[in-house]
Amino acid sequence: MTGNAKNFLQHAGKMAADSRRRQAIAVALNNYQIARDQRETTYHDWQAVRHAAAETKWEAIHQLDQHLLTFADKIGLRGAKVYWAGTDLEACQIIIRIIQTRGAHSIIKSKTMAGEEIHLNRALELAGFEVAETDLGEVIVQRRHEPPFHTVFPSMHLARGEIKELFQREFGEVPSDSPEDLVQVARDALREKYFTADVGITGANFAIAETGMISIAENEGNARLVTALPKTMITLVGIEKILPRFQDLALFLPLLATAGAGQAMTAYNTIYSGPRQFGENDGPEEFHVVLLDNRRTEILANVEQREVLHCIRCGACLNVCPIFRNVGGHAYGPVSAAGPIGAVTMPLRDRLADWRHLSEASSLCGACTETCPVKIDLHHHLLRNRRQAVQKKISWLEQFKYDLFTSFVNHPAVWSFGKTFGRLAQPFQRMIRGTALDPLRAWTRTRDLPPLAKESFKDWWRKRKPVRPGKSMK
């Protein structure tokens, strides 16, 4: 078992045992589902919208090289500088080099999942820079020194009382744990950072090839301040975020809002096309765009699974996943590994041996596929990851387990022995359940195991329906 798998089991066990926190998350996600269902009914044909989005992303990904070059040329014509980062290390080095060239020290960030993917904050802090998140959820988890819990709702696992205690520790007196007071405290603490920051770093929801523009959707307005006040703006964007045409935003912005938060539209939708132009009142003096590969082109080369690059990071698959709802986001490790989409992409983007457990931590219920706004066939991709993991070299112990199971299910005599053993074990089941002698203790420690049946199905069926002449019942 890898270290990642051990961490998953440790965090999952801790979260599964915390019924209060699980209940709070369930309530939050149920409220999300109600809002989303109501929003979907306002569409004339929601399934047709999903189909159109899937077709558009198919076009974008299958012509990715052309769209990326067009995007780089178009945004470059307006004065933006474009960088190509092949790996997470290269991306961090490029961003650090830009900041050092500017002689900057203070950095503010709006939410960027690509930044979480490459551990950008840690890299910047090790390089000696002060980094401040500005999205409220990100502010909270940064101050707690933990990764985001969820792609869209980073601090959804915390109660308001916990946030109040954190803010009192970090910022001073907090009047109450009401959302209004908590937001005001965070706003007061961040205000000075906006005005003193040398560099603003953002992510991007979409990159438009046709016009060379970056689209950012948000609900708090912090990204607008991050881009408008510092003299230097850096946008980190995964290459799969490309959309072919400007008019595609008319489809994808409401789609993202509906799938991600059950909204008609996010509160702030802003488009950036370069540094401040002559006659404009605000905006950065320099605009840098870092296009991140980080093995995305390797996924693109995988004809069977390149579809996962269609993801628009709405977080909908996390919201409906029964595993995520019970084990929480931190069990998966990085936020980019969380939920069904993370369970699919991490084994593709990193070492399969290190992340194969994520694809196995799934009920394969198909809820993720059903809810995905761009129709990614997620649960079948999880199965493909499992198949590839089995095809790789596995340990002798794991091979022995597979062989033993195969022998068991393919031989009726073994089943008959199991039936006999069940009858013999019946009186002892209740006595040993949960004790050190219980072979299923890992299961029964937290779950009820149904009692062994007093009668097998075959025995019951034989009594109910006599075997016809010339037939046998093995």
Image (spheres, grey):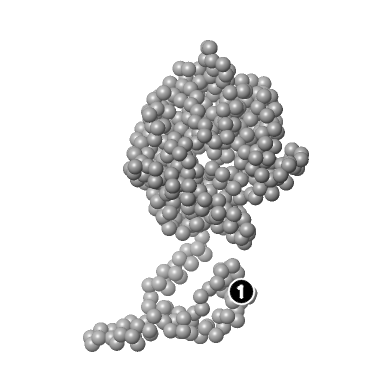
Residue 415, position in %: x, y? 41, 78
In the foreground, 80 or 314: 314
Task: Report the side of 101 relative to 325 (left or right).
Answer: right
Label 1: element kind: loop
Which is more toward the observer, 12 or 403?
Answer: 12
Give percent across and percent down for residue 76: 47, 20
Q: Is residue 204 among what the camera can see?
A: no
Q: Amino acid at mark 1?
A: Gly
Tally the marks: 1
Is residue 403 something that shows in the picture?
yes
- For residue 44, what is the image quadrant? top left
Vertical comparison of 226 with 458: above or below: above
Left or right for 67, reference 361: left
Identity of the residue drawn at 48% across and 22% down: 273
* Residue at horizontal 38 percent and vertical 29 percent from the top: 247
Position of residue 336 measured from the top left corner of the image (x, y, whole percent): 53, 44
Residue at image position (73%, 46%) is: 165
Residue occupied by mark 1: 434
**The C terminus lies in quadrant:** bottom left
Looking at the rendered image, the quarter that the N terminus falls into is bottom right
Percent of width and height locating residue 244: 38, 30
Q: For mark 1, does the 10 Å Cα neighbourhood hold few (<14), some (14 to 19), or many (20 or more) residues? A: some
